[in-house]
Amino acid sequence: MIEEITDNGPQVTIMSLKNVAVSFSGKVAVRDATFDIAKNRVTSMIGPSGSGKTTLLRAINRLHDLTKGAKVTGEITLDGEDIYNGGIPTTLLRSRIGMVFQRPNPFPTMSIYDNVASGLRFNGVKKKSVVDEAVEHALQSAALWDSVSHRLKVAASTLSGGEQQRLCIARALAVEPEILLMDEPTSALDPVSTQHIEDLMSSLKEIVTIIIVTHNMQQAARVSDNCAFLLMGEDRAGELIEFASTEKIFTKPSDKRTLDYIQGRFG
Amino acid sequence: MSDLQHVMTTDERRAFVQKAAKSSLQKRELTSKFFLGMMATALLIAFIPLFSILQSVISKGAHYLTWGYLSKPQQTPFAFDLANIGGFSNAITGTILVDGLAVLIAVPIAVLLAVSLYESDGRVMHFLRVTTEVMIGLPSILLGIFIFTFVVTPMGYRMTALAGSLALAILMVPLIAIASEAALRDVPDTLKEAALALGARKSRVMLRVILPYALPRMVTAVMLSTSRAVGETAPVLFVIGASSLTSWNPMSPVTTLPTMMFTYLQGSNPYIIKSLWGMALILMIIVFFFNLLARLVVARSSKRGL
């Protein structure tokens, strides 16, 4: 396990955050986030509640666009292209950056198959053979195929919580995003389902870059290659304290606050 | 995963999806513009009559908003001076009296009905629910006939404000109850469970947790049904007596603004027919204040936490 974390290998940057700050109606929620996301690696964001992890994550696929009064400043680039000012249409950007949410949220009115196919259909992929193949592949990748292949037309709500979350992962994977954002994807799940999803992440790395927000430090240590530590400042705005390889963050962090946090002294 | 036969590699599929997304985006943008245009047109179509009615009611009715018209009751139709039409005070007080009483009668019944529909789901309740839903579609003149037969006639053909209120209450109860029940159903079950888990009785859960949560939508339902009732002529026409006297007594005959407008329309005095605009404007103002009041009540109670 440790070896896997240690062996980061040569890294290619797929995304860069530069001085990213998010504010809501003028109130700063997170600021000063500057770090690079390595391609085909898992990057985790850890920190106590209110440190702005989720806020930062949602800035990456422009979900704050939906919130009145929300403002994102700084620069986020995907493959060198500015995602806010670079002329990538928001919908195309979101098809390239998938997301899995804290609570499993399969579309309740759709079958298992239709849930997974939904992203493809939203993006105009109509050819049945392509959709069929992508659905199967996505369900395979999410380690769900074997248990649902015989009941693809069944309502997604019939699945258990852990299965529903894997379905959401499959749904996100079906559009073949380059980056997959995961917002505390296991916080609503039992340990076995959590284990499933953690195992999944290490295999998914081959096809997608993962950014995961987690409350659970052990989880960050287990699954991620790089780690960003955020903390709420005195003005109640979150800020990036330290960014490094997960191994460094958990063994010899350079900031005392990081050390305090990973040793459980606060938060 | 290893036994899966890939027809496409991940990169190939990624390229495929991206290409499809890009090409469909152009088409989607066109469709999106088209529907945006449709929506703007629909909005315009919906608002043109609304604004023109509002505009004409205000412009033709505004000069009736004088103390003279507001304070004097209507002139008896036998006046020698056709231009001396009196005022609307009897209809204004009548409207407030009849509709206020109707709200007071309808709201408790409707809320209790909504709570029972929400809490129980037996066969009887199902029948009750269907009946309530059907009642919404009842022609309102039937309510007038009903009250005339079962309230006015037994009292020796005595027409009263109360009879009108009863007719309007029957109109309002199903409207409020069905909408309120939907509001209650939308209260998250976790809130109910949280309260029950504290050892709260069912009645406490309803009063302290469920009803306060559903209150804003229930008040909206009351507002909408009141506005509907205020504008109704048919249910009250034969039961309130169309009196030209100003009275606050629920047991006396009164008139309401729509009823007076209806009776005025039967006549031929041009001064009286013109004054319908003034009455329409006053009716609109009354409805507006009803709504404002209800919103204030909700805002205050939600701040207090009820």
Image (tube, rainbow, N blue to C red):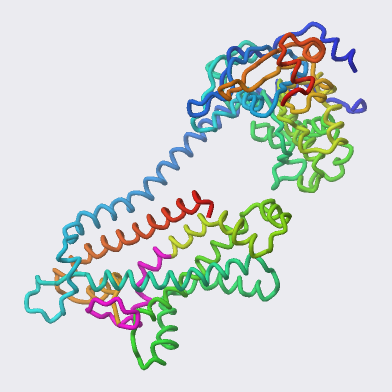
Residue placed most toward the observer, A208 or B280? B280
**Residue farthest front in this picture:** A265
Residue A260 x %, y %: 75, 18
Residue placed most toward the observer, A203 or A214? A214
Residue B289 x %, y %: 34, 58
Residue B252 x %, y %: 31, 83
The image quadrant of residue A225 is top right
**Compared to B212, does A79 lie above or below?**
above
Specify start and end residues of the magenta stretch as a single range. B226-252
Residue A69 x %, y %: 49, 30
The image quadrant of residue A238 is top right
* Image position of A234 (left or right of A9): left
* Image position of B137 (left or right of B51): right
**Compared to A187, does B188 lie above or below?**
below
**Compared to B56, does A25 lie above or below?**
above
Magenta residues: mostly which secondary structure? loop
Residue B230 in the magenta stretch? The answer is: yes
Instruction: Please give the name of the residue rendered at 19% of the width and 57% of the height, measured from the top-left corner.
Output: B60
Instruction: Please give the name of the residue rendered at 21% of the width and 70% of the height, measured from the top-left corner.
Output: B88
**Residue farthest right in this picture:** B3
* Image position of A42 (left or right of B221): right
Instruction: Please give the name of the residue rendered at 57% of the width and 29% of the height, measured from the top-left corner.
Output: A64
Image quarter hosting the N terminus of chain B: top right
Residue A143 in the magenta stretch? The answer is: no
Residue placed most toward the observer, A149 or A165? A165
